[in-house]
Structures are given as structure tokens and as C-alpha cells.
Amino acid sequence: MKQLPRPLASLFNLVSQPAITLLIATLLVYGFFIPFLGFYWDDLMLQWISQSMGTSGLANYFSTNRPVWGLFYQLSTSLLGDDPWQWQVFAIFWRWLAAYGLYYLGMQIWKEKTPALLAALIFLTYPGFAQQYIATVFGHFFLVLSAFFFSLTFSLIAISTLDRKRDWLLHVAALLLSALNLFSMEYFFMLELLRPVLLWVLLREDTVPVRQQLMTVIKRWLPYLLVFLAAGFWRAFLFDYQTNNYEVGLLQMLRANPLQTILSLLGTVLWDLWQTVLKVWGLVVQFPGFKEFGPRAWMIMVVFSLALLVFAGLVLFWLGRQSSPTTKPERSKYWMSLWAALIALLLAGVPFWLTQIPIGLTFPNDRFTLPFILGVSLFWVSIVMLIPLRRWVQVFILVLAVAFSAAYQLRMGIQFQRDWEQQTRFFWQMTWRIPALEEDTIIFAHELPLRFFSDNSLTGGLNWIYSNPDRQDNTIPYVLYYPTVRVGLAFKTLTPDESVEQNLLVGTFYGNISQSIAIFYQPPACLRVLDPELEPDNWMVPLQVRETIHLTDWEMILPEPQHLPPSIYGSEPTHGWCYYFQKADLARQLGDWDEVQRLGEIAFQLDDQPNDPAERFPFIEAYAHLSLWQEAVEMSDQSSGVSSVIRPAICRLWDRIERETQDSEEKSSAIQRAIETLQCEAQP
């Protein structure tokens, strides 16, 4: 075969180094989004705790939930601060290192670079887990997983070395890394039992009696078993909160109805294996519509996934060219790795099956697929390598799967980017409308169009904006609740004057149901603080929020001091329609009708216009108070013309106008015209 020019050959030799290959692949899949992402899910709460309460706050937060793991957060947040891009780099680094650890583990199993690198690439892009961009949380997950992979690798290397000093050092390192995994968190706890299986795979010899082989494996595994038992004892008996947070409900069900429980468990196990091993690949071919997703997003997805396909293909071709095997690959080692993969998959699910936590392929339950990725990677490499095909065909099948998985991860990156932009607009509009907020206030909202956030995580953002950074006590001053989630948990019912007490791990919120405001946010419409007098009849607002409107107290909203979102949300956006609407609505609350009119004169000259008929309400009311009756009626007609559903709310608005404005003939004529147009007497 013709030799490549020396510079090109040197380049291929460099990029085909596993660490560099995996680093380039990681950056191709996840690196593009580093500057465009923020904080999601629990990241938002953790970052607020870190910035407002420091390491002591984080220690308190994790004291009842993975306290050892919390030590890593205390160190990392002290080093990285609150810049989102640094956390994206942090998460990408640990994902890359975990993939590198899996590569070396594969090398111990197969003694060959190609399958080991393919397993690492599958791990790197596995589509069942799509929360890589929740960087603060899952960067630490991959830190622990890296420790586990290298622990397995070091212990396997140690049994093959002839250097007793090196053997001892490798075992010590492996034991420490194993302890880090076992004492940090429960996700990868049961995977530790894969170690004796892998020891058996490497130590197995056909000429040695099975009993003797077993004794050798047990002898080698014994120190790790002792660490495993110590961690299990600590979790079961010394760390009391472990069983409080994750109750082993399966044991109670077994005692109550053993046969039905066993059958149900078997069904759950088979379903979860089906999801994580087979069904998951259906995600990679579910492409979004071109117009819906956008041409730029499509271009990003196609360019980077094709780049990974070409790059990985060339590297693996070069590795195959360099090795040039003259003998047929041993199939037996792939059979052994296949059995190890199946055992890994079963061990991965044990913590979730015991605690009856549902595993899924969509957010947020796709995080529970993390322990399965090791088994999935080993499984598919083993299966494809056992198919009687030419090696280049086997490699092409797996590289193609990796490229499609990368395209899926890129699609998810775009979704995360858009979600962050949406959250940024949400909090900027909130501060425009609510400059300051009385402490102990509840904000009720429908389940907001923020895909990668919960009401609990948004509570972190809310407090980051409005809470006093010099607070010394452990109370949490604000919460944001989705009524569909919190009724029956944080409080019993939506009954006025019911007290609320919720432990948020880092502190407790004490409030009252009647000390709340209700908001509605459905882009492209602006965020709205709902009017307790008008909105009960506004059927354009979801029922779950309308049921909280009677509890709203606008006295909780203070005109000063003006709070702003933290620096993570960037500089203040250009003032468009929503800015002027928010400020006009605030002025309406304060009864400053001249200011509402002034803001309206600016707002209605913009290209941007109202996207919800209720966004004209402040201006209708202001024009009426300023005796600009013709303008008030015309704007009322514009709002009612959008949808008949809004008419009952506009009728309530005219009732208030009639009650609160001075009588005049022009007023009577205007109100009569408005009522007739709206058919208010016929409204329910």
C-alpha cells in the first residue's frame, strides 16, 4: 500500500492517539455550544447557593443528600465561580476523561485499539442521556464515573504486571478511586460488582481448574469487596438520610405480594433493558422539521455530525492500517465481553428497580440511563464484532451509529441554547415588571415553557435576583410554585391564609398562600402579572393558574429598589414591546396614568406589537382615567377582536373603569359603546 507523505502520516499518528481522538470528538459534539449555554435544572439552585451562601451553604444542601459528593461541589464552585461557559468546559472535560477511562478499560478487555475506541465513542455520544449541558450537576457525575472507570482499569492492569511495586501502587489507586465512587453517590454503586466479572475474564484459562480460577479472582477482589461492604454499611446504617431519601419500596411489596411483585419487577427489568439498549436508537432518526427547527440549526447539526463521521472513520481506518492484523480476530473475547456487558446492564438498573424510580428516554428521567452506558457500549461493540462481516464493515456500522448519536446530541444542544434564551427573557421581563418583592412571597405559575427547568430550580433564580445577599438566617425568602406539582406537597389546598412551610435542603421557606402573586408567560406574548379582579374570567390563561388568582396580592410587588438579574443573564436586552408593556403595567398598578400613556406613545410606534389581547389592558385603563375615551374604546375593540374568549375579562375591566373614573357624558357614551360591542350582559 502506498505510503502517505511524512507530514500527513505524522498528523494521523498524532490525532489517532486515543486521548486526542476522543478530545476532538468531544469538542465536535459538545464544544460548539460552550459560549451559548447557561444554567439548567438543579444547576440554577446550586449556583445561587454557592454565590449567596458559599461553601457552608453547599455543605448544608448536601448534608442530607450525598454529603461526600458535596465536597467536590464546594471545591469546584470556589474555583470556577458562576461563569456558565467555564462550567460547560468543566462538564466536557469530565465527559472526555470518562470516555478515555472507558477506552483503557476496553483495551484491557479486548487488547485491541479499534473496539476499545469504538466503545468510548458510543459512550461519548449515547443518545439515551441528553443532559450533558446541565453542566454543574453532570460534570460531577462524570467526575465520579471517571474515577470508577479508571479504578476498574488500574485493577485489571495490576493483575497483569510483573512488577510487584507497580502492582501495589495500581491497587492502592484503584481502591481509592473505588471508594470515591462508592461513598459519593448511588448511581454507579452496584456496578462495582462488575469488577470480579472482569477479573474472571482476564484471568480465565482453559487449562486451569475452575475452582482454582475462582479462588484467584476472589483473592484479587477481596480488598475491593471490603471497600464495597464498608460503603454499603455506611449507607445503610450510618448515613440515616440515605434510606429516607431513597426508600427501598420493593422490599415492602415483596413481603405483601411476592409473586405479583416478582412478575412486575421482571417486566420492569425487561422494559428498561429494551429502552436503554434497543429503543434508544430510535431517537437518533427522529429528525425535526426543517422549517420548525430552522436552517441554521440544521446546518450546525449536519456539519458537526458529518465532521465526526469523517474524522472517526479516518482515525479508525488509520489504526486498522497501522495494525494490519494477519490473523483472524479471536471471537471468544467478544463472547466474554458480551456476557460482561449483560451483567453490567443488570447491575446498572438495581438501584432504580429497588427504589422503583422510573427510567426513561426523555427529560428529566433520561438521567437514570447513565449507569447503563457502560453496558450498552460493551454490548454493541461485542455484538457487531461477532457478526461475520469484514472488519471495515463492522467499524462502519458502529461509526455511523456514533455519527447519528452525535447529531441527536447536537439537536439537544440547540434545544438547551433556546431554553436558556427563553429563561433569560423570562427573568428580565420579571424584573421590569417587579422591581422588588416583599419577602416570604409565593409566585404561582403554570408549567412555564422552559423545558429544562422545574419550579424548584426557578426558585433558585428567583432568590438570586430578589433575596438580600447579606441574609444571615437559613430561611428562603421566595418560592416559585407550579400548582399542579405543589398542591398536596408544599401545601394542602389553595385556601386563603393557609400557611406554607417547605424545606429546600439549604433552608426553609415560610409563607402564606395569600401572600402571593400569579404570573402567566406564553411567548411570544409577554410575561404578565395576573390581575386578581380581571383574570378569573380570562380563559386564555390556564385553569391551573386562574385557580390561584384569588390569592394574588399586588401589595407584594414593590416599586423599588430596582433589582436586576445576575450577570449570568448578560446585559439588559434592547427595549422592545415587552419592556414598555411591563413598565406600563407597573405604572398601572401604581395608578400613574400619565406614565402609562407616555410609555404607550413609545410602545405603539415600535414594529413589535402585542401578542396577547390582555397586553392592551393597562393602556385602555389609562386612557379612560385620562378621559381619552375614544382611544380607550378603540383599543378595547382591538383586544376583543383577537378572540371572543377575552371578552369577559374586558367586561370586568370596563366595570372597574366605570367604578373608578369621574362621571361625564363622554364616559357614559364610551362605556355604553364598549358594553354593546363586547356584549357584556350576555357574557357568563
Image (tube, rainbow, N blue to C red):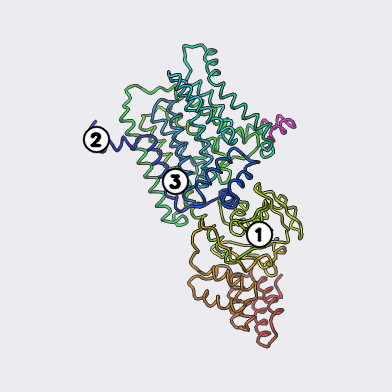
Q: Is residue 608 magenta?
A: no
Indicate the quadrant containing the C terminus: top left, top right, bottom left or bottom right: bottom right
Q: Which amino acid lies under the numbered mark 2 shown in the image of this protein? A: Leu
- Mark carried by residue 169: none
Residue type at mark 3 is Tyr
Sequence-earlier tag: 2 or 1: 2
**Apparent side of residue 560 relative to residue 418 in the rendered image (left or right):** right
Task: Pick whichever, 551 or 645, lies toward us.
Answer: 551
- The residue under label 1 is 443
For marks 2 and 1, give the CA distance: 66 Å
Instruction: Kindly tell me whether residue 41 is visible in this rendering.
Output: no
In the rendered structure, find residue 30 and report the number of the disc placed on it.
3
- Nearer-N-terminus badge (1/3): 3
Residue 610 horizontal side relative to residue 555, left or right: left
Question: Where is residue 572 shown, x and y percent of the image?
Answer: 50, 64
Task: State the extent of the magenta-drawn residues as a range.
Answer: 246-262
Q: Nearer the viewer, mark 2 or mark 1?
A: 1
| Three-letter code, disc 1 | Ile
Distance between mark 1 and mark 3 Cα atoms: 35 Å
Q: Quadrant of the N terminus?
A: top left
The answer for how far apart the CA atoms under marks 3 and 2 are is: 31 Å
The reply to whether dot 2 and dot 1 touch (C-beta < 8 Å) is: no
Rendered image quadrant of residue 256: top right
**Does dot 1 land on a helix, a strand or a loop?**
strand
State whether residue 302 is above or below residue 274: below
- Residue at the spot 70% in from the left edge and 29% down from the top edge: 259
Could you say where residue 155 lies in the image, as x and y percent from the top left? 49, 25
What residue lies at 72% left-to-right and 52% top-to-bottom?
501
User: What secondary structure prevails in the magenta region?
Assistant: helix
Q: Which mark is residue 4?
A: 2
Cβ atoms at labels 1 and 3 below 8 Å apart: no
Local crowd size for mark 1, using a 10 Å CA cut-off: few (<14), some (14–19), many (≥20): many
